[in-house]
Image (cartoon, rainbow, N blue to C red):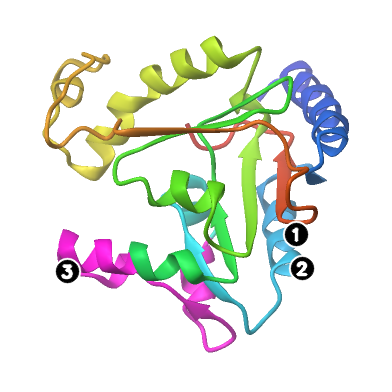
Amino acid sequence: MHWTKKWQLQQIAHQMVDTLNSKGYITHYAEDVEEAKKLVLEIVPEGSSIAMGGSILLGDMGLVDIFRSDKYRFYDRYATHSYEECYQVYRESMMADWLVTGTNAITRNGEIVNTDSSGNRAGGIIFGPDKVLIVVGANKVVDDLPAAFKRIKEIAPMNAKRIGHQTPCAISGVCENCESPQSICNATSIIHHGRKHPGRFNIIMIADEVGY
């Protein structure tokens, strides 16, 4: 990455830390993924029960293996063998101490926007686990809600392809506004601010391009 691009991401991340803190979230700055990983392990106490939202970034950080250790109680959606089993884990994980997740987009005004297949991430962020930790790269910052919805449509084909869903977008590479039974765009959540339950939302803003 050219240093000017990194500089721009740093400026966005610093600005968003200030904005998000002013909106009632507890927000942390991370220079890169490794620093973000250290922050996750500092923020989430050992002994906690943990749910995870599907995220390339969190997988790349090695958090699944860490949370599987005997230091934590992990709602392991990845160890299931069928969607029915996975769905049961989703339901049980609504009672977790922590939801650790990524996000699809975050606006410059501090709205956190997600579109889900099953709704476990969107539902858990809104109301479920006692605490929520969102790890997000500065590349996911967008101007406003219309830009967030546009971004979600642009990345949906990659997510559908990644998890093997047989949707029109997984063939064409562009959103087809489908109503397929395998659609991954079934529920959308918007968090406007973190003031309702002070201390519930932690956000790590990474000054880098991570996930998609």
Q: Is 30 left, or right, of 146 in this rendering?
A: right
> What element does badge 2 sit on?
helix
Q: Residues within 10 Å of mark 3 (few under 14, many from 20)?
A: few
Image coords of residue 62 (percent x, y): 52, 63
Residue under numbered circle 2: 42
Q: CA distance from mark 2 to mark 3?
A: 32 Å
Is residue 95 visible to the viewer in this orientation of the structure? yes
**Numbered range of the magenta stretch:** 62-89
Residue farthest toward the front in the current orientation of the protein: 196
Residue under numbered circle 3: 81
Sequence-wise first label, 2 or 3 = 2
Residue 145 versus residue 79 in the image, above or below: above
Q: Three-letter amino acid code at disc 2?
A: Glu
Image coords of residue 178 (percent x, y): 18, 19
Residue under numbered circle 1: 39
Residue at 54 percent across and 49 percent down: it is 125
Looking at the image, is mark 1 or mark 3 nearer the viewer?
Answer: 3
User: Is residue 208 one of those drawn in magenta?
Assistant: no
Residue 2 versus residue 125 in the image, above or below: above
Q: CA distance from mark 1 to mark 3?
A: 31 Å
Q: Quadrant of residue 18?
A: top right
